[in-house]
Image (cartoon, grey):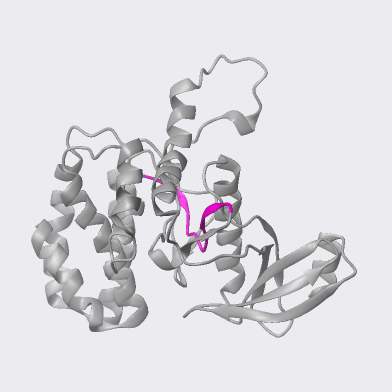
Amino acid sequence: MFAAIKEALGTERLESTGRGGGGCINEGEVFKTDKGQIFLKRNSKSKAREMFDGEFESLKAIVATGTVKAPTPHLVVDNPAGGAVLVMEYLDMHGLNRQSGALGEQLARMHLHNIKKLEKFDESHVGGGEESKPVTQFGFSVPTCCGYLPQDNTWNDDWVVFYTRKLQEQLTMIEKDYSDREARELWSKLQRKIPEYFKDLEVKPSLVHGDLWSGNAAETADGPVIFDPASFYGHHEYDLGIAGMFGGFSRKFWDGYHSVIPKAPGFSNRHKLYQLFHNLNHWNHFGSGYRSGSLHLMRTLC
């Protein structure tokens, strides 16, 4: 594994600094190389390669927009001991504070990046390569994992259909593990009502982070940073769902975001609809402590 990393990075030196960290899913460690420091993210689970391949492509897509800083991904390798390792740029990050407003503005610009390409794109343009074409559908090139659960990012022309499918995946898992009658009955009502929340609203594909709670944002001396993405092309408001949970983002973040992308009519209900996915996802990850919040949102939206 380490030989593959050295070869890919063109370095003879790969020395642990002894610094690292981890969350509820992965462990991380900082290494010194001939070309500076890198961050190795490890997971021993059998599905780790799929998870890290999705994160690799997510980071690559975010970095390519040139709108908000994210660690540049280098490679994903299998770990002989089990699982996989994601190698990326090391950033000296600290808790988000002074850069909250800048993060809001930059996130909005990331969301507008593909939309602006769509508006400017001309099918008859000359000299443009494949990379210059905007994304015209909702989805992503690979599955991505929000937590450790994979998301079906199969391309779809219709955002309402795509997002309803995302919710259905979560409810299917809940049905399998909990056979929750109330969740089943509420979902039967809600899925018929979802299209109403998008009436008279044109949704264009935006690259989203996919899991942007405050623990996945920070700042360096140069500005704000986002990391641990589970990206896809979706409605830009989707990212604001989990951003509004757990109380981690300041008013400056929200003001910065909406100074670039103002709220559209019906935002409040769609905000709840997007929070529903994350409540259901947390229910599937961490258990029935998230049941009441999930059902409350479903009752409100029905």
The segment highlighted magenta reads: 222-235
Image quadrant in which the C terminus is located = bottom left
From the top left corner, tell me how far across and down residue 72 is, in percent.
Answer: 65, 55
Q: Nearer the viewer, residue 59 or 280?
A: 59
The residue that appears at 54% across and 79% down in the rendered structure is 22
The residue that appears at 36% across and 53% down in the rendered structure is 239
Q: Tell which residue pokes out farthest to the right in this image.
A: 12
* Side of 110 relative to 125 (left or right): left
Res 132 visible: yes
The quarter holding residue 8 reads bottom right
Q: Nearer the viewer, residue 272 or 194?
A: 272
Was residue 299 drawn as part of the magenta stretch in this picture?
no
The residue that appears at 87% across and 60% down in the rendered structure is 10
Image quadrant in which the N terminus is located = bottom right
From the top left corner, tell me how far across and down residue 165 is, in percent.
Answer: 32, 55
From the top left corner, tell me how far across and down residue 116 is, in percent.
Answer: 45, 28
Q: Tell which residue pokes out farthest to the bottom in this image.
A: 81
* Side of 125 relative to 218 (left or right): right
Count the marks: how many? 0
From the top left corner, tell me how far across and down residue 17 is, in percent.
Answer: 73, 79
Q: In the figure, 64 relative to 220: above or below?
A: above
Q: Nearer the viewer, residue 29 or 131?
A: 29
Res 136 visible: no
Q: In the figure, 206 relative to 165: above or below?
A: above
The quarter holding residue 157 reads top left
